[in-house]
């Protein structure tokens, strides 16, 4: 990543990587911090913006300062696609040079009933047609695929959570909004069922 490294060196010359606001992590993630975020000059006190490539797309997530941890009070930070049309020179360079991660994808759970295939959409079992199929990329697999924060339900916007008891491994279900962090009532969501997959991609 010659151009990315050159731009990082130009932004903060003569600064060790460990003390930089902008740096590469594991030579695969780009992390940027705003030096104007708060009065403390220590980089560990700054909000982190991380970038990674997957599916030919640049993704970003916003993490709390290192001094706080890796999750916000309302849960883990989801990945979002980056619009490179208004991106900086550094982000455009990293989007060209950065390594490609596998892509986490949300799909409808397929149930085999007799000779038919069915989806569970909003709690109702219906024929598994192409019109109802979902193939929703939701972020790069930078560590383990199960650690990528799940997207919100594409049918109703509720939270999608692990739901493997009595179902095949990988099953997820929409359970709506939480009562409090991590606590749900099963009948609050629309009940749509999904599976997650890690999809290898090529540059």
Image (tube, rainbow, N blue to C red):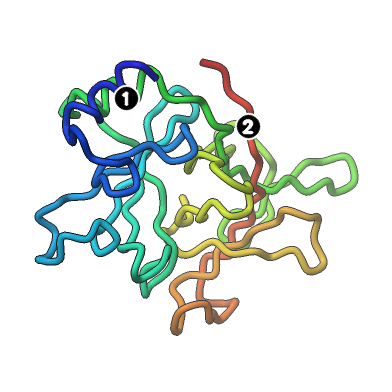
At horizontal 38% and vertical 36% (from top left) the residue drawn is 24
At horizontal 14% and vertical 52% (from top left) the residue drawn is 35
Depth order, front residue of 100/115:
100
Which quarter of the rendered picture does the N terminus lie within?
top left
Residue 142 to residue 148: above or below = above
Depth order, front residue of 24/54:
24
- Binning the other alpha carbons within 10 Å of mark 1 as few (below 14), some (14 to 19) or many (20 upward) gives some
Depth order, front residue of 1/89:
1
Residue 6 sits in which quadrant? Answer: top left
Residue 86 image offset from top left, x and y in percent: 15, 28
Name the disc covering residue 199, or none.
2
Residue 31 to residue 164: above or below = above
Residue 93 to residue 65: above or below = above
Residue 150 image offset from top left, x and y in percent: 52, 55
Asked if the residue at tag 2 contacts the one at tag 1, i.e. Cβ–Cβ closer than 8 Å, the answer is: no
Quick check: 197 left or right of 26?
Answer: right
- Binning the other alpha carbons within 10 Å of mark 2 as few (below 14), some (14 to 19) or many (20 upward) gives some
Depth order, front residue of 161/53:
53
Name the disc covering residue 5, or none.
1
Residue at disc 1, secondary structure: helix
Residue 160 image offset from top left, x and y in percent: 54, 61
Quick check: 176 left or right of 124?
Answer: left
Residue 202 image offset from top left, x and y in percent: 56, 17
Q: Earlier in the sequence, mark 1 or mark 2?
A: 1
């Amino acid at each position: 990543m010659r151009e990315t490294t050159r731009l990082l060196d130009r932004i903060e010359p003569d600064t060790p990587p460990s003390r930089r606001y902008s740096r590469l992590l594991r030579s695969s993630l780009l992390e940027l911090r705003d030096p104007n975020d708060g009065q403390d000059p220590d980089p560990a006190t700054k909000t982190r913006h991380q970038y990674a490539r997957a599916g030919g797309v640049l993704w970003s997530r916003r993490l709390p300062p290192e001094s706080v941890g890796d999750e916000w009070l309302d849960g883990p930070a989801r990945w979002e696609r980056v619009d490179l049309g208004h991106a900086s020179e550094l982000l455009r360079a990293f989007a060209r040079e950065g390594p490609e991660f596998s892509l986490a994808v949300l799909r409808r759970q397929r149930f085999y009933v007799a000779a038919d295939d069915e989806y569970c959409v909003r709690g109702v079992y219906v024929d598994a047609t192409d019109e109802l199929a979902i193939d929703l990329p939701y972020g790069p697999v930078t560590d383990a695929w199960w650690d990528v924060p799940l997207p919100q339900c594409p049918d109703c916007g509720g939270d999608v959570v692990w739901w493997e008891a009595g179902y095949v491994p990988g099953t997820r279900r929409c359970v709506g909004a939480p009562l409090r962090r991590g606590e749900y009532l099963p009948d609050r969501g629309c009940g749509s069922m999904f599976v997650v997959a890690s999809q290898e991609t090529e540059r």
